[in-house]
Amino acid sequence: MPELFSPLTLRSLEIPNRLWMSPMCMYSADDADQRGRPTDFHLSHYASHAFGGAGLVMVEATAVQERGRISPWDLGLWESSQIPGFQRLVAGIRQGGAVPGVQLAHAGRKASADWPGGTGAALSYEQGGWHTIGPSPVAFPGYPAPQEMTAQDISEFIEDFVNAAQRARQAGFDVVEIHAAHGYLLHSFLSPLSNRRSDDYGGDFTGRTRLLREVITAVRGVWPDHLPVMLRISTTDWVAEDPTRQEDSWTVEDSIELARDAYELGVDLIDASSGGLVPAKISPETDYQTSKAARIRSEAQGHVAGVGRISEATVAAELVSSGDVDAVFVARQLLRDISWPNQVAVALGASPRHIPQYGYAVGG
Protein backbone atom coordinates (compact mmCIF):
# COMPACT_ATOMS: atom_id res chain seq x y z
CA MET A 1 0.00 0.00 0.00
CA PRO A 2 1.58 3.35 -1.01
CA GLU A 3 1.86 5.58 2.05
CA LEU A 4 -0.22 8.22 0.24
CA PHE A 5 -3.17 5.85 0.60
CA SER A 6 -2.50 4.75 4.16
CA PRO A 7 -4.66 6.24 6.92
CA LEU A 8 -3.50 9.19 9.00
CA THR A 9 -4.73 9.41 12.57
CA LEU A 10 -4.94 12.82 14.22
CA ARG A 11 -6.04 12.55 17.83
CA SER A 12 -8.82 9.92 17.60
CA LEU A 13 -9.82 10.71 14.03
CA GLU A 14 -8.68 8.38 11.27
CA ILE A 15 -8.52 9.97 7.83
CA PRO A 16 -8.64 7.16 5.23
CA ASN A 17 -5.85 8.48 3.01
CA ARG A 18 -3.45 11.41 2.73
CA LEU A 19 -4.66 12.98 -0.53
CA TRP A 20 -7.05 15.72 0.48
CA MET A 21 -9.23 18.36 -1.13
CA SER A 22 -7.93 21.84 -0.38
CA PRO A 23 -10.35 24.61 0.62
CA MET A 24 -11.17 26.63 -2.51
CA CYS A 25 -13.56 29.57 -2.57
CA MET A 26 -16.52 29.03 -4.90
CA TYR A 27 -18.25 32.40 -4.31
CA SER A 28 -21.60 30.69 -4.81
CA ALA A 29 -23.59 31.19 -1.61
CA ASP A 30 -27.33 31.64 -1.84
CA ASP A 31 -28.15 34.80 -3.81
CA ALA A 32 -31.58 35.25 -2.26
CA ASP A 33 -30.46 37.19 0.83
CA GLN A 34 -26.66 36.89 0.77
CA ARG A 35 -26.61 35.24 4.19
CA GLY A 36 -23.76 32.84 3.47
CA ARG A 37 -25.85 29.69 3.12
CA PRO A 38 -24.70 26.70 1.04
CA THR A 39 -26.71 25.78 -2.05
CA ASP A 40 -27.37 22.61 -4.03
CA PHE A 41 -24.22 23.48 -5.96
CA HIS A 42 -22.12 23.11 -2.81
CA LEU A 43 -23.73 19.79 -1.96
CA SER A 44 -22.95 18.42 -5.42
CA HIS A 45 -19.48 19.94 -5.47
CA TYR A 46 -18.25 18.61 -2.14
CA ALA A 47 -20.01 15.23 -2.21
CA SER A 48 -18.63 14.56 -5.70
CA HIS A 49 -15.07 15.09 -4.52
CA ALA A 50 -15.66 12.72 -1.62
CA PHE A 51 -16.89 10.04 -4.03
CA GLY A 52 -13.85 10.86 -6.21
CA GLY A 53 -11.55 9.50 -3.52
CA ALA A 54 -10.27 12.42 -1.42
CA GLY A 55 -9.61 11.33 2.16
CA LEU A 56 -10.50 14.72 3.66
CA VAL A 57 -12.79 17.25 1.99
CA MET A 58 -12.18 20.73 3.36
CA VAL A 59 -15.05 23.13 2.75
CA GLU A 60 -13.98 26.55 1.51
CA ALA A 61 -13.24 29.66 3.58
CA THR A 62 -16.34 30.21 5.71
CA ALA A 63 -16.72 33.61 7.33
CA VAL A 64 -16.95 33.94 11.10
CA GLN A 65 -18.38 37.46 10.76
CA GLU A 66 -20.60 38.91 8.05
CA ARG A 67 -18.03 41.63 7.37
CA GLY A 68 -15.35 38.95 7.17
CA ARG A 69 -16.54 37.62 3.81
CA ILE A 70 -14.22 37.98 0.85
CA SER A 71 -17.26 38.66 -1.31
CA PRO A 72 -21.03 38.88 -0.82
CA TRP A 73 -21.22 35.28 -2.09
CA ASP A 74 -19.00 33.67 0.54
CA LEU A 75 -20.24 30.98 2.87
CA GLY A 76 -20.61 31.86 6.53
CA LEU A 77 -21.20 30.43 10.00
CA TRP A 78 -21.81 33.68 11.84
CA GLU A 79 -25.39 32.75 12.77
CA SER A 80 -27.22 29.55 13.70
CA SER A 81 -29.62 29.73 10.74
CA GLN A 82 -26.70 28.75 8.53
CA ILE A 83 -26.11 25.40 10.25
CA PRO A 84 -28.72 23.27 8.39
CA GLY A 85 -27.14 23.98 5.01
CA PHE A 86 -23.78 22.78 6.27
CA GLN A 87 -25.36 19.68 7.77
CA ARG A 88 -26.35 18.70 4.24
CA LEU A 89 -22.77 19.14 3.06
CA VAL A 90 -21.43 17.02 5.92
CA ALA A 91 -23.89 14.24 5.13
CA GLY A 92 -22.92 14.26 1.46
CA ILE A 93 -19.21 14.17 2.22
CA ARG A 94 -19.63 11.31 4.67
CA GLN A 95 -21.71 9.33 2.20
CA GLY A 96 -18.85 9.65 -0.28
CA GLY A 97 -16.44 8.11 2.21
CA ALA A 98 -14.42 11.19 3.15
CA VAL A 99 -13.89 13.08 6.40
CA PRO A 100 -15.68 16.48 6.44
CA GLY A 101 -13.71 19.57 7.41
CA VAL A 102 -14.35 23.30 7.21
CA GLN A 103 -12.00 26.28 7.04
CA LEU A 104 -13.05 29.21 9.24
CA ALA A 105 -11.89 32.60 8.03
CA HIS A 106 -12.08 36.37 8.12
CA ALA A 107 -10.95 38.31 5.07
CA GLY A 108 -9.93 41.46 6.95
CA ARG A 109 -8.67 44.20 4.64
CA LYS A 110 -9.23 41.98 1.56
CA ALA A 111 -12.98 41.68 2.24
CA SER A 112 -15.79 43.27 0.22
CA ALA A 113 -14.39 42.21 -3.15
CA ASP A 114 -15.96 41.67 -6.56
CA TRP A 115 -15.96 37.86 -6.92
CA PRO A 116 -16.91 35.68 -8.75
CA GLY A 117 -16.72 36.66 -12.38
CA GLY A 118 -15.57 40.16 -11.59
CA THR A 119 -12.16 41.74 -11.43
CA GLY A 120 -11.51 41.05 -7.76
CA ALA A 121 -11.55 44.80 -7.14
CA ALA A 122 -13.02 46.29 -4.00
CA LEU A 123 -16.78 46.77 -4.15
CA SER A 124 -18.12 50.28 -3.69
CA TYR A 125 -20.89 50.86 -1.17
CA GLU A 126 -23.28 51.37 -4.10
CA GLN A 127 -22.32 47.87 -5.30
CA GLY A 128 -23.04 46.33 -1.91
CA GLY A 129 -19.59 46.73 -0.39
CA TRP A 130 -18.83 47.41 3.27
CA HIS A 131 -16.19 48.86 5.58
CA THR A 132 -13.30 46.48 6.23
CA ILE A 133 -11.14 46.01 9.31
CA GLY A 134 -7.49 45.13 9.89
CA PRO A 135 -4.66 45.43 12.39
CA SER A 136 -3.69 48.85 11.02
CA PRO A 137 -5.07 51.31 8.44
CA VAL A 138 -2.72 49.92 5.77
CA ALA A 139 -4.52 49.15 2.54
CA PHE A 140 -4.08 46.10 0.35
CA PRO A 141 -3.00 47.61 -3.00
CA GLY A 142 -6.05 48.85 -4.90
CA TYR A 143 -8.37 48.50 -1.89
CA PRO A 144 -9.53 51.09 0.65
CA ALA A 145 -7.58 51.26 3.90
CA PRO A 146 -9.27 49.16 6.60
CA GLN A 147 -10.40 50.52 9.92
CA GLU A 148 -7.86 49.72 12.63
CA MET A 149 -9.36 47.17 15.01
CA THR A 150 -10.02 48.33 18.54
CA ALA A 151 -9.65 46.18 21.64
CA GLN A 152 -13.40 45.58 21.50
CA ASP A 153 -13.18 44.55 17.83
CA ILE A 154 -10.48 42.03 18.72
CA SER A 155 -12.48 40.62 21.62
CA GLU A 156 -15.59 40.28 19.44
CA PHE A 157 -13.58 38.64 16.67
CA ILE A 158 -12.23 35.95 19.00
CA GLU A 159 -15.71 35.33 20.40
CA ASP A 160 -17.21 35.10 16.91
CA PHE A 161 -14.46 32.68 15.83
CA VAL A 162 -15.30 30.46 18.79
CA ASN A 163 -19.03 30.63 18.06
CA ALA A 164 -18.43 29.70 14.43
CA ALA A 165 -16.33 26.72 15.51
CA GLN A 166 -19.14 25.56 17.76
CA ARG A 167 -21.62 25.88 14.90
CA ALA A 168 -19.25 23.90 12.69
CA ARG A 169 -19.32 21.08 15.19
CA GLN A 170 -23.12 21.29 15.44
CA ALA A 171 -23.18 20.90 11.67
CA GLY A 172 -21.17 17.67 12.08
CA PHE A 173 -17.68 18.61 10.88
CA ASP A 174 -14.84 16.48 12.25
CA VAL A 175 -12.06 18.92 11.37
CA VAL A 176 -11.88 22.68 11.72
CA GLU A 177 -9.11 24.70 10.08
CA ILE A 178 -8.15 28.20 11.19
CA HIS A 179 -7.31 30.33 8.14
CA ALA A 180 -4.26 32.49 8.87
CA ALA A 181 -2.90 32.72 5.32
CA HIS A 182 -3.21 34.57 2.00
CA GLY A 183 -3.31 38.10 3.37
CA TYR A 184 -6.57 37.69 5.24
CA LEU A 185 -7.15 39.03 8.75
CA LEU A 186 -5.03 36.69 10.87
CA HIS A 187 -2.17 36.72 8.36
CA SER A 188 -2.28 40.52 8.26
CA PHE A 189 -1.69 40.57 12.02
CA LEU A 190 1.35 38.28 11.62
CA SER A 191 3.24 40.32 9.04
CA PRO A 192 5.02 43.62 9.79
CA LEU A 193 4.07 44.72 6.27
CA SER A 194 0.45 45.13 7.37
CA ASN A 195 0.65 45.26 11.17
CA ARG A 196 1.92 48.65 12.39
CA ARG A 197 0.33 48.49 15.83
CA SER A 198 2.14 49.68 18.94
CA ASP A 199 -0.04 47.83 21.47
CA ASP A 200 0.14 44.20 22.65
CA TYR A 201 -1.02 42.96 19.22
CA GLY A 202 1.81 44.55 17.25
CA GLY A 203 5.52 45.20 17.29
CA ASP A 204 7.70 42.12 17.69
CA PHE A 205 6.98 38.48 16.79
CA THR A 206 5.27 37.84 20.13
CA GLY A 207 2.93 40.79 19.70
CA ARG A 208 2.09 40.13 16.06
CA THR A 209 1.32 36.45 16.72
CA ARG A 210 -0.70 37.13 19.86
CA LEU A 211 -4.13 37.28 18.18
CA LEU A 212 -3.59 34.01 16.34
CA ARG A 213 -2.36 32.32 19.51
CA GLU A 214 -5.46 33.54 21.34
CA VAL A 215 -7.72 32.29 18.55
CA ILE A 216 -6.04 28.87 18.58
CA THR A 217 -6.42 28.61 22.36
CA ALA A 218 -10.06 29.69 22.25
CA VAL A 219 -11.01 27.33 19.41
CA ARG A 220 -9.12 24.41 20.93
CA GLY A 221 -11.02 25.12 24.15
CA VAL A 222 -14.41 24.45 22.54
CA TRP A 223 -13.46 21.91 19.85
CA PRO A 224 -13.79 18.29 21.06
CA ASP A 225 -10.57 16.91 22.49
CA HIS A 226 -10.74 13.81 20.30
CA LEU A 227 -10.94 15.79 17.04
CA PRO A 228 -8.16 17.75 15.29
CA VAL A 229 -7.70 21.47 14.72
CA MET A 230 -5.68 22.46 11.64
CA LEU A 231 -4.03 25.78 10.84
CA ARG A 232 -3.37 27.20 7.37
CA ILE A 233 -0.51 29.68 7.19
CA SER A 234 1.39 31.51 4.50
CA THR A 235 4.92 30.32 5.12
CA THR A 236 6.32 33.49 3.51
CA ASP A 237 5.13 36.82 2.08
CA TRP A 238 7.69 36.26 -0.75
CA VAL A 239 9.28 39.62 0.04
CA ALA A 240 12.37 38.33 1.85
CA GLU A 241 13.12 36.11 -1.17
CA ASP A 242 13.23 39.14 -3.49
CA PRO A 243 16.69 40.81 -3.39
CA THR A 244 15.22 44.04 -4.75
CA ARG A 245 13.00 44.49 -1.69
CA GLN A 246 14.27 45.42 1.75
CA GLU A 247 11.06 45.56 3.82
CA ASP A 248 10.62 43.51 6.96
CA SER A 249 8.10 40.77 6.21
CA TRP A 250 6.85 37.35 7.30
CA THR A 251 9.45 34.66 6.61
CA VAL A 252 9.84 30.89 6.64
CA GLU A 253 11.83 31.19 9.85
CA ASP A 254 8.88 33.05 11.43
CA SER A 255 6.58 30.27 10.27
CA ILE A 256 8.74 27.59 11.88
CA GLU A 257 8.68 29.48 15.19
CA LEU A 258 4.92 30.01 14.91
CA ALA A 259 4.39 26.32 14.13
CA ARG A 260 6.20 25.33 17.34
CA ASP A 261 3.88 27.62 19.32
CA ALA A 262 0.80 26.36 17.49
CA TYR A 263 1.59 22.70 18.16
CA GLU A 264 2.01 23.47 21.87
CA LEU A 265 -1.36 25.22 21.90
CA GLY A 266 -3.14 22.20 20.41
CA VAL A 267 -2.94 22.55 16.63
CA ASP A 268 -2.64 19.07 15.15
CA LEU A 269 -1.49 19.90 11.61
CA ILE A 270 -0.07 22.90 9.76
CA ASP A 271 -1.44 23.43 6.24
CA ALA A 272 1.54 25.18 4.66
CA SER A 273 0.64 27.61 1.84
CA SER A 274 2.26 30.97 1.01
CA GLY A 275 1.79 34.53 -0.19
CA GLY A 276 -1.29 36.68 -0.62
CA LEU A 277 -0.43 39.54 1.70
CA VAL A 278 1.10 41.84 -0.93
CA PRO A 279 1.87 41.53 -4.63
CA ALA A 280 5.23 39.74 -4.87
CA LYS A 281 7.35 37.58 -7.13
CA ILE A 282 6.67 33.90 -6.45
CA SER A 283 9.10 31.16 -7.36
CA PRO A 284 8.22 29.23 -10.54
CA GLU A 285 9.57 25.98 -9.06
CA THR A 286 7.19 23.07 -8.54
CA ASP A 287 8.24 22.75 -4.89
CA TYR A 288 7.85 26.48 -4.21
CA GLN A 289 5.62 25.73 -1.20
CA THR A 290 6.20 22.07 -0.41
CA SER A 291 9.90 22.64 0.28
CA LYS A 292 8.88 25.12 2.97
CA ALA A 293 6.34 22.67 4.36
CA ALA A 294 9.13 20.12 4.64
CA ARG A 295 11.23 22.56 6.67
CA ILE A 296 8.36 23.13 9.09
CA ARG A 297 7.85 19.39 9.56
CA SER A 298 11.55 18.82 10.13
CA GLU A 299 12.33 21.82 12.32
CA ALA A 300 9.06 22.29 14.24
CA GLN A 301 8.44 18.55 14.66
CA GLY A 302 4.72 18.29 13.97
CA HIS A 303 2.25 17.15 11.35
CA VAL A 304 2.29 19.17 8.13
CA ALA A 305 0.34 19.07 4.86
CA GLY A 306 1.87 20.36 1.63
CA VAL A 307 -0.10 22.21 -1.03
CA GLY A 308 0.57 23.90 -4.37
CA ARG A 309 1.30 22.70 -7.92
CA ILE A 310 0.61 19.07 -7.06
CA SER A 311 -0.84 17.55 -10.22
CA GLU A 312 1.10 14.31 -10.76
CA ALA A 313 0.57 11.04 -8.91
CA THR A 314 4.29 10.41 -8.44
CA VAL A 315 4.86 13.88 -6.98
CA ALA A 316 2.05 13.47 -4.45
CA ALA A 317 3.29 10.01 -3.50
CA GLU A 318 6.93 11.08 -3.11
CA LEU A 319 6.07 14.05 -0.90
CA VAL A 320 4.48 11.70 1.62
CA SER A 321 6.77 8.67 1.29
CA SER A 322 9.89 10.83 1.65
CA GLY A 323 8.65 12.18 4.97
CA ASP A 324 8.60 15.75 3.69
CA VAL A 325 4.92 16.03 4.61
CA ASP A 326 2.25 13.89 6.25
CA ALA A 327 -0.43 14.62 3.63
CA VAL A 328 -1.09 16.71 0.55
CA PHE A 329 -3.89 19.17 -0.10
CA VAL A 330 -4.76 19.38 -3.80
CA ALA A 331 -6.70 22.26 -5.34
CA ARG A 332 -6.80 23.03 -9.07
CA GLN A 333 -6.15 19.45 -10.13
CA LEU A 334 -9.35 18.41 -8.35
CA LEU A 335 -11.28 21.10 -10.17
CA ARG A 336 -9.95 19.70 -13.43
CA ASP A 337 -10.69 16.10 -12.47
CA ILE A 338 -13.03 15.21 -9.62
CA SER A 339 -11.98 11.55 -9.64
CA TRP A 340 -8.23 12.25 -9.64
CA PRO A 341 -7.60 10.67 -6.20
CA ASN A 342 -9.13 7.40 -7.37
CA GLN A 343 -7.06 7.55 -10.55
CA VAL A 344 -3.91 8.18 -8.51
CA ALA A 345 -4.74 5.15 -6.37
CA VAL A 346 -4.99 2.96 -9.47
CA ALA A 347 -1.76 4.39 -10.91
CA LEU A 348 0.11 3.62 -7.70
CA GLY A 349 -1.31 0.13 -7.29
CA ALA A 350 -3.58 0.99 -4.38
CA SER A 351 -7.29 0.29 -4.09
CA PRO A 352 -9.47 3.19 -5.20
CA ARG A 353 -12.54 4.01 -3.20
CA HIS A 354 -14.96 1.45 -4.55
CA ILE A 355 -18.16 3.09 -5.73
CA PRO A 356 -20.35 0.43 -7.40
CA GLN A 357 -22.11 2.97 -9.58
CA TYR A 358 -18.76 4.12 -11.03
CA GLY A 359 -17.04 0.74 -10.90
CA TYR A 360 -17.00 0.27 -14.68
CA ALA A 361 -14.71 3.28 -15.04
CA VAL A 362 -12.34 2.81 -12.12
CA GLY A 363 -8.99 1.80 -13.54
CA GLY A 364 -10.42 1.67 -17.04
Image (cartoon, rainbow, N blue to C red):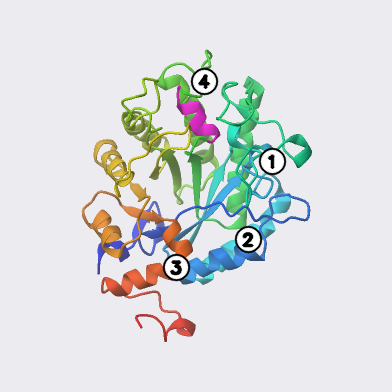
Q: Nearer the viewer, mark 1 or mark 4?
A: 1
User: SS of the residue at dot 3?
Assistant: loop
**What is the C-alpha distance between the residues marked 4 and 2?**
36 Å
The image quarter in which residue 15 lies: bottom left
Q: Nearer the viewer, mark 4 or mark 3?
A: 3
Amino acid identity at mark 3: Asp
Q: Earlier in the sequence, mark 1 or mark 2?
A: 1
Q: Which residue is mark 1?
A: 66
Q: Nearer the viewer, mark 3 or mark 2?
A: 3
Q: Residue at x 46, y 64 (%)?
A: 336
Answer above or below: position of 329 versus 96. Answer: above
User: SS of the residue at dot 1?
Assistant: helix
Q: For mark 4, does the 10 Å Cα neighbourhood hold few (<14), some (14 to 19), or many (20 or more) residues? A: many
**What is the C-alpha distance between the residues marked 4 and 3?**
43 Å
Q: Earlier in the sequence, mark 3 or mark 2?
A: 2
Amino acid identity at mark 2: Gln
Q: Earlier in the sequence, mark 1 or mark 3?
A: 1
Q: Nearer the viewer, mark 1 or mark 2?
A: 1
Answer above or below: position of 313 versus 243. Answer: below
Q: Nearer the viewer, mark 1 or mark 3?
A: 3
Q: Is residue 137 visible?
A: yes
Q: For mark 2, does the 10 Å Cα neighbourhood hold few (<14), some (14 to 19), or many (20 or more) residues? A: some
Mark drawn on residue 277: none
Q: Which residue is mark 4?
A: 201
Query: Which quarter of the image is occupied by the C terminus?
Result: bottom left
User: SS of the residue at dot 2?
Assistant: helix
**What is the C-alpha distance between the residues marked 1 and 4?**
23 Å
Q: For mark 3, does the 10 Å Cα neighbourhood hold few (<14), some (14 to 19), or many (20 or more) residues? A: few
Q: Which residue is mark 2?
A: 87
- Side of 233 where 63 appears, left or right: right
Residue span colored magenta: 184-192
Amino acid identity at mark 1: Glu
